[in-house]
Amino acid sequence: MNEILSDNFKQAIKDFSYLNENEYPRKAILKLIGDRYRLNKSQRTLLNRGILRKKDTVDRYQKKNQNIKNSKLLIDTYNVLLIISNYLLGRIVFISTDGFIRDAGETHGKINRDKVFMRSVEYLFEYLDAERPSEIIFYIDNPVTYSGELAEHLRECLREKKLKGDAIVVNNPDRELILQKEGIIATSDSEVMNETSCRICDLPAQVLNARFKVHLIDLGEIVSDKIPGLGRHPV
């Protein structure tokens, strides 16, 4: 991680955050800062996924609810499982300025049900079994390969753990989640987080902390522009 988190990159983070906060076009400043500091692909992805405006950060913090016990839980399935999988693979997983963890991976709809991915399912269900939400609904992207098989496997896991719920394959999970009016949504997708009227939770962080002592890059600490009353919270 040291080669990623160089002094050069830390300054790029601060400059990008300043320009983003002042509402310069995000795509343009990503290229400007990326080229100015000669950032690699991973560093540019961290900027793009990890630096949010204060307004979005505050809105998401106000919606955040990590207590899923006895609550209806709506899971953005691939979003959650891929973050866990990438951590297990030793890939870059980091804390964004909104306090949610994200990864720097680029899957583009190509997901293999390998041993590590299936282990992420196992760890997720260990956590869900311990917390016992009142109901769990998995939303799975239909265009992604093996989605039907994954849905059936998740239903089987629900039955084995005697957890109430279902796994459904839909064309647009983000839109389906945004339309929900009750329950806690597990996602780090910016569109869903901004538009939903439901509470949101950082489920991958909870799962990983239940199994490991995670020490991640925290972009909010690097920006060091604290929001009054918000501060930094542990993953």
Image: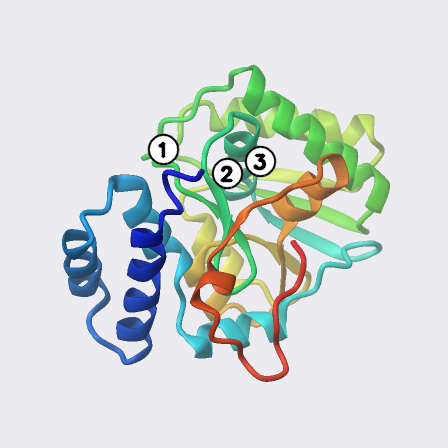
The percent coordinates of residue 180 (x first, y second) are: 57, 63
**Are there few (<14), some (14-19), or many (20+) residues within 10 Å of tag 3?**
many
SS category of the residue bearing label 1: loop
The residues bearing labels 3 and 2 have C-alpha atoms spaced at a distance of: 10 Å
The residue under the point 56% across, 42% down is: 80
**Amino acid on which the number 2 mark rests in the picture:** Tyr
Q: Are marks 1 and 2 in contact (CB under 8 Å)?
A: yes
Residue topped by disc 3: 84
Q: Can you identify the residue that label 2 sits on? A: 78
Neighbor class of circle 1 (other Cα within 10 Å; few <14, some 14-19, many 20+) is: few
Residue in the image at 50% along x and 32% along y: 86
Image position of 4 (left or right of 212)? left
> What residue do we see at 74% from left, 35% from top?
211
Q: Earlier in the sequence, mark 3 or mark 2?
A: 2
The image quadrant of residue 1 is: top left
Mark sitting earlier along the chain (1/2): 2
Q: Is residue 105 above or below residue 33?
A: above
Whole-percent x, y for residue 231 in the image: 61, 73
What is the number of callouts on the image? Answer: 3
Per the image, the residue denoted by label 1 is 107
Tell me the mark number nearer the camera, choosing from 3 and 2: 3
Mark 1 vs mark 2, foreground winner is 1
Is 62 placed left or right of 38 in the picture?
Answer: right
Q: Residues within 10 Å of mark 2 (few under 14, many from 20)?
A: many
